[in-house]
Amino acid sequence: MSHPKTLPCTKPPSLSFSTSSPLSDFCMELFFPCLLVAFVSFTFISLQILFYKRQVTSKPNLPPGRVGWPIIIGESLEFLSAGWRGYPEKFVFDRMVKYSPECFKTSILGYLTAFLCGPAGNKFLFTNENKLVTVWWPEPVNKVFPTSLQTDSNEEAKKMRRLLPQFFKPEALQTYIAIMDTVFQKQFGSWWEGKDEIHVFSLAKQHTFFLACRLFLSVEEPDHVARFAGPFHLLGAGIVSIPIDFPGTPFNKAVKAAKVIRKELMVFIKQRKHDLAMKKATPTQDILSHMLNVVDEDGKHLSDLDVADKILGLLIAGQDTLTAAMTFIVKYLAELPHIYDIVHKEQVEIGKSKAPGELLNWEDIQKMKQSWNVACEVMRLSPPLQGAFRQAITDFMYAGFSIPKGWKWSANSTHRDPECFPDPEKFDPTRFEGKGPAPYTFVPFGGGPRMCPGKEYARLVLLVFMYNAVTRFRWEKVLPHEQIIVNPTPMPAKGLPIRLIPHAKSNKED
Ligand code: HEM
């Protein structure tokens, strides 16, 4: 707005004796914005009070705990900062001690939330799927996947879940092992070998993404993969951001990136359909072919857009989780040489049983028991996800407390609980020997009917990765005290630089 004093003076001189001073002009200019701010603040506070009364004080017998103020922020800062400091479980444990070991209430990330703790809490939630609770995804997830808007992300996930076993069934997964081995051999050859130092986190991202492009889409050309990688990175960063759709925000970039990838995928899908019709591609060669071939319960094929979104969903779900698991396996093996030796011994034995050039197969994977125990112990101490979201679909009672419909839940409170895992800070893969941990205590992949459908795929990727890493190298951390940040997946603050110590050539054989 132009200030009157800057305009040419068209008024009679007498008006210059007006009673308004520059100060009062200034005050008048500020008056309306202030009034607006006051009005918005008043409305916001009133709505908060109303909401608080309706959701919190009017409900009897809620679990103990604090919802913070304003509720929309609640205890989000405490929750997030525990993760930024590398101890996300501290938020839960402090409140379990202060309020109740079974259940407490809070408000995080804009939602009233009840944490149901311990194995009993996990059991309750995992066994009451679609009865009392249902899977729930934060708002950005719904917005980034437009086909999800036709129903909602939950419906889409259910549809996906009905189809997934066909892509991840054992016969299909078994054929992926040799491909995984081939891909890792190439990657280790060019990304690890000949280097003194590498940054594990960024390489793990690339290992995971290149492998997924190969197994989901049969895309191998580095240039081609790179066309997806840029927008995919933006998508990953924005899907867990605050959903403000304004140019330049991470969320806005994610929505745009999803469109770019979807467009690229649609070109692929068209080409693949053509290749399948011309018998230039096979119906089982990768997940894309499987998806194009599959029919739903009404005998209908998935639409092209659905296929594109489902591939995108799988790429997203597997990317940061596998990257974190891979990175932390390398981290713990660097820190614990005696654990490294166990894995190395097991993998070298498997290597020795192979003919020169023979790729890994299903039988080899079955022999990698100790390595998998190590990977599990890594995921116990540094779970790639801190929990799984659920929403109450009806009011219900838990441990004598009432949980209102609509409240959210998310937690993983058992992994470092001494009652579930004695001496919980100790890295001890033998916990997974024999019968392993008690039910509902070890839950890195969630549980119940919505347990991660990519679990078996993830197991294969991690084991083939471990084989290729330890049979080639030993390593040490460049930064012995590197900080860990959990946001929302765990990552080393400086990307985990390590010094590589290649084994003598003969070491792979003996
Ligand atoms: C170490 C790697 C992984 C970990 C720790 C992990 C963990 C999880 C967790 C905790 C959930 C939520 C489960 C629940 O709600 O109870 C989940 C869901 C899911 N994961 Fe994974 N995941 C991993 C890798 C993968 C991979 C590689 C894929 C795909 C190839 C995948 C696909 C999915 C999908 C589609 C869902 C949603 C399922 C639904 O809502 O029904 N995950 N994962």
Image (cartoon, rainbow, N blue to C red):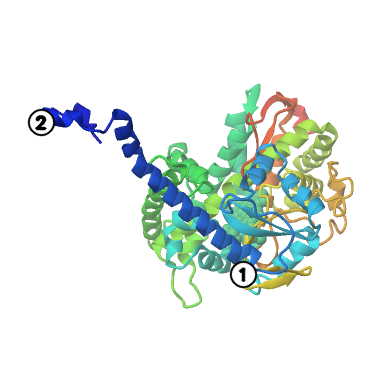
Q: Amino acid at mark 2?
A: Pro
Measured from the top left, where is residue 44 in percent x and y?
49, 54
Dot 2 and dot 1 residues touching (CB under 8 Å): no
Measured from the top left, where is residue 5 in percent x and y?
21, 28
Q: Residue at x 54, y 65 (%)?
A: 154
Q: Which residue is denoted by mark 1 in the rendering? A: 405
Secondary structure of the residue carrying tag 1 is loop
Q: Quadrant of residue 478?
A: top right
Secondary structure of the residue carrying tag 2 is loop
Q: Quadrant of the N terminus?
A: top left
Q: Categorize mark 2 by other alpha carbons within 10 Å: few (<14), some (14-19), many (20+).
A: few
Could you say which is closer to the camera, residue 479 or residue 70? 70
Could you say which is closer to the camera, residue 466 or residue 362? 466
Specify which label sits upstream in the sequence, 2 or 1: 2
Q: Amino acid at mark 1?
A: Lys
Specify whether tag 2 is near ligand 1 (CB below 8 Å): no
Q: Which mark is residue 253?
A: none
Q: Which quarter of the rendered image does ligand 1 occupy? A: bottom right
